[in-house]
Image (cartoon, rainbow, N blue to C red):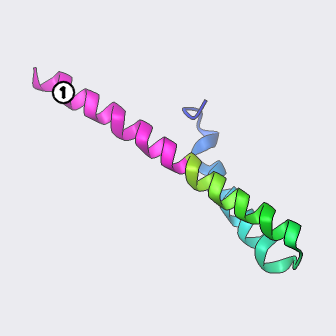
Amino acid sequence: MFSKPIFETLPIALIAAGILLVTFIHHPLSAFTGLVLVLGSCYMIYRRVNEISLSNDEQDLTSAI
């Protein structure tokens, strides 16, 4: 799922939306939603970076043989 190109830029837009929700709408529900968006997007970026690093490690191991 995370290999599609939309997932390269989607977390950045969600982080921006989360920050806007937290800063401009002063309501506890919007603050919670904004924080969930930011944390979820950070998790998406974390998974993508791990996926890239794992694929690079595998390539390094196979090329050394």
Residue 44 falls left or right of residue 52: right
Report x, y in % for residue 18. 74, 65
**Quadrant location, the N terminus:** top right
Residue 62 falls left or right of residue 42: left
26 vs 32: above or below: below
Report x, y in % for residue 25. 87, 76
Q: Image point 27% across, 28% down: which residue?
A: 58
Residue 51 falls left or right of residue 21: left
Q: Residues within 10 Å of mark 1 (few under 14, many from 20)?
A: few
**Quadrant location, the C terminus:** top left
**Which is the main secondary structure of the residues drawn in magenta?**
helix
Residue indicated by mark 1: 61
Q: Image point 61% across, 50% down: which residue?
A: 9
Q: Image point 49% across, 42% down: which residue?
A: 48
Determine which quarter of the picture holds residue 20.
bottom right
Determine which quarter of the picture holds residue 34.
bottom right
Instruction: Specify the farthest residue to the left.
Output: 65
Amino acid on which disc 1 is placed:
Leu
Task: Classify mark 1: helix, strand or loop.
Answer: helix
Q: Is residue 55 magenta?
A: yes
Which of these two is toward me, 45 or 28? 28
Q: Which residues are magenta?
A: 45-65
Which of these two is toward me, 27 or 6? 27
